[in-house]
Image: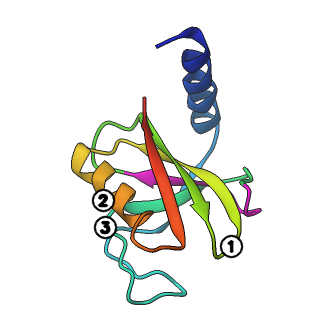
């Protein structure tokens, strides 16, 4: 991993370390607009941050050690936007679930970038 990559991950660590994580969609709950979609991993955001959609930066919180282990880069064709989602403490199985969640439809695609 080169210095530029290390700088990116350190900056992301700093952002997360200095932000409150709010889990507003716990594992096992339904999406507020799409009740057939059930979250399989805790989902939330970093309080007092902003992402491309104007809301807080999204986070997936897994069952492992609470450190950043990957990001998802998403393109949403319905909303016509893109953003990143930070994965914190996600096991390999949870990373796969998050990846599949963002690639299930023709309207949203994402790539997983591991730390």
Query: Which segment did they paint magenta?
Result: 52-61
Residue 79's tag is: 1
**1 and 11: which is toward the camera:** 1
Q: Is residue 63 above or below residue 16?
A: below
Secondary structure of the residue carrying numbered label 3:
loop
Instruction: Name the quadrant containing residue 27.
Output: bottom left
Would you call the spot at circle 3 few (<14 residues within 10 Å), some (14-19), or many (20 or more)? Answer: some
User: Are the residues flagged by discs 3 and 2 in contact, CB closer than 8 Å?
Assistant: yes
Q: Is residue 105 above or below residue 84?
A: below
Q: Residue at x 28, y 42 (%)?
A: 64
- Whether 1 is among the magenta residues is no
**110 and 12: which is toward the camera:** 110
- Whether 59 is among the magenta residues is yes
Residue 67's tag is: none
Mark 3 or mark 2: whose residue is earlier in sequence? 3
Instruction: Name the quadrant containing residue 9.
Output: top right
Residue ID for mark 2? 97
**Where residue 17 sits: x, y (%)?**
57, 33
User: Are the residues flagged by discs 1 and 2 in contact, CB closer than 8 Å?
Assistant: no
Q: CA distance from mark 1 to mark 3?
A: 23 Å
Secondary structure of the residue carrying numbered label 2:
helix
Residue ID for mark 3? 40
């Amino acid at each position: 991993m080169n210095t530029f990559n290390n700088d990116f991950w350190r900056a992301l660590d700093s952002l997360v370390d200095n932000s409150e994580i709010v889990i507003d969609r716990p594992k096992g709950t339904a999406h507020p607009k799409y009740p057939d979609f059930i979250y399989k991993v805790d989902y939330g955001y970093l309080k007092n941050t902003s992402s491309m959609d104007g809301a807080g930066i999204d986070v997936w919180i897994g069952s492992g050690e609470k450190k950043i282990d990957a990001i998802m880069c998403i393109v949403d064709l319905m909303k016509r936007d893109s953003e990143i989602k930070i994965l914190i403490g996600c096991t390999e199985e949870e990373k796969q679930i998050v990846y599949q969640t963002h690639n299930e439809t023709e309207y949203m695609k994402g790539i997983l970038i591991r730390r």
